Amino acid sequence: MTLFHGYTSIITIILLATSYLVIFSEATTTSSSQLSNAILIKVDPSGKGDYKKIQDAIDAVPSKNTQHVFILVKPGVYREKVVVPSDKPFITISGRKTTVKNTIITGNDYGDIFKSPTFTVFASDFVARYLTIQNTYGSGAKAVALRVEGDKATFVGCRIMSHQDTLLDDVGRHYYKNCYIEGDTDFICGNAASLFEKCHLHSLSQSNGAITAQHRQSPQENTGFTFYGCKITGVKSAILGRPWGAYARVVFAQTYMSSVILPNGWEDWNDSSRQRTSYFAEYKCYGPGASSNKRVNWLKTLSSEEAVPYLKESIMGPKSWTRSKPTHLTPLSKVNSNKFNKKRSSP
């Protein structure tokens, strides 16, 4: 009976991993060109760019856009709700690596996870680089900094900061690399299929706050969060995750865990039935918070073979839908005015 149960568990893990892998490998077969040429729109709060507000730059992009649009955001504090609509794909919004802490998009709305976000992405093929996206409401209520619902969205070197529900990683395939994500309760939540690579997760929780709350609700959904080569720090104590959806799926691989992570590691959201249906796994994690001695008994500890489908090389494939910075930029002033709205922002 023990051997049969162990064999069944391994088969289950492989099937789950294989179905999850499909989400990302499909992206390589449908990948468009690298879009190395782009239209450049400059946003500068001082008035020296094409627009003073980020939303005005987005609004200037035509509906059903097919060109790569690179919106360069100069340092400043942008107090605005930013929405990238679904009919405007192929947009990159970028600060500079050296000024990410000074390129701040900020809001303080709260209460509803779908209405409170400071920054919302509905469009596909979206990239954000070197931006600080924050919700400054504070603790005690749902206050989303970033909501991502578009497919094939990439975030590189961004700082995403709030307390509860900081990142609503809602729907679609997403890739986060070298991002700093901060919060106290369920601060990475949603039902997307996402890879977090070399990200720094910082818990502000004072008592047992969950880092993740993944919302997968059935075994048919190819969604889940994978954290690969990440780092976890915090101010007091936290757990790695709890199942917002009954079939929540979260994997931490080769991740440093500080002592902020409690020995049990995970919780079932006061519903023991979710211990059987959720999929929480760890692989070769290290640091004082990574000890498996007192972990919940329903945690999956992956072998090297079982972990393969969750590692970056397997998930993203030899190619990917992520875009690098374009090599050739055409200023907005040289673009056909019939396609782009060139009206400058009002003060």
Image (cartoon, rainbow, N blue to C red):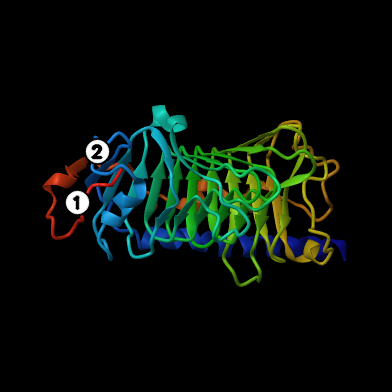
Secondary structure of residue under mark 2? loop
Where is residue 262 shown, x and y percent of the image? 80, 40
Secondary structure of residue under mark 1? loop
Tell me if mark 2 has few (under 14), some (14-19) or many (20+) residues whose alpha carbon lies within 10 angstroms of its own. Answer: some
Q: Residue at x 19, y 51 (%)?
A: 342
Q: Which mark is residue 49?
A: 2
Q: Residue at x 56, y 46 (%)?
A: 108
Residue 215 position (above or below residue 240): below
Q: Quadrant of the N terminus?
A: bottom right
Where is residue 183 shown, x and y percent of the image? 64, 42
Q: Which callout, 2 or 1, points at the residue further toward the start of the chain? A: 2
Q: Nearer the viewer, residue 174 or 12?
A: 174
Which residue of the protein is positioned furthest toward the top in this rendering?
Answer: 98
Residue under pointer 1: 342
Image quadrant where residue 287 sits:
top right
Where is residue 323 shown, x and y percent of the image? 34, 47
Q: Is residue 330 left or right of residue 255?
A: left
Where is residue 109 shown, x and y percent of the image? 56, 51
Dot 2 amino acid type: Gly
Tell me if mark 1 has few (under 14), some (14-19) or many (20+) residues whose alpha carbon lies within 10 angstroms of its own. Answer: many
Image quadrant where residue 63 sits:
bottom left
Dot 1 amino acid type: Lys
Q: Quadrant of the C terminus?
A: top left
Q: Nearer the viewer, residue 168 or 227?
A: 168
Which residue of the protein is positioned furthest toward the right in this rendering?
Answer: 1
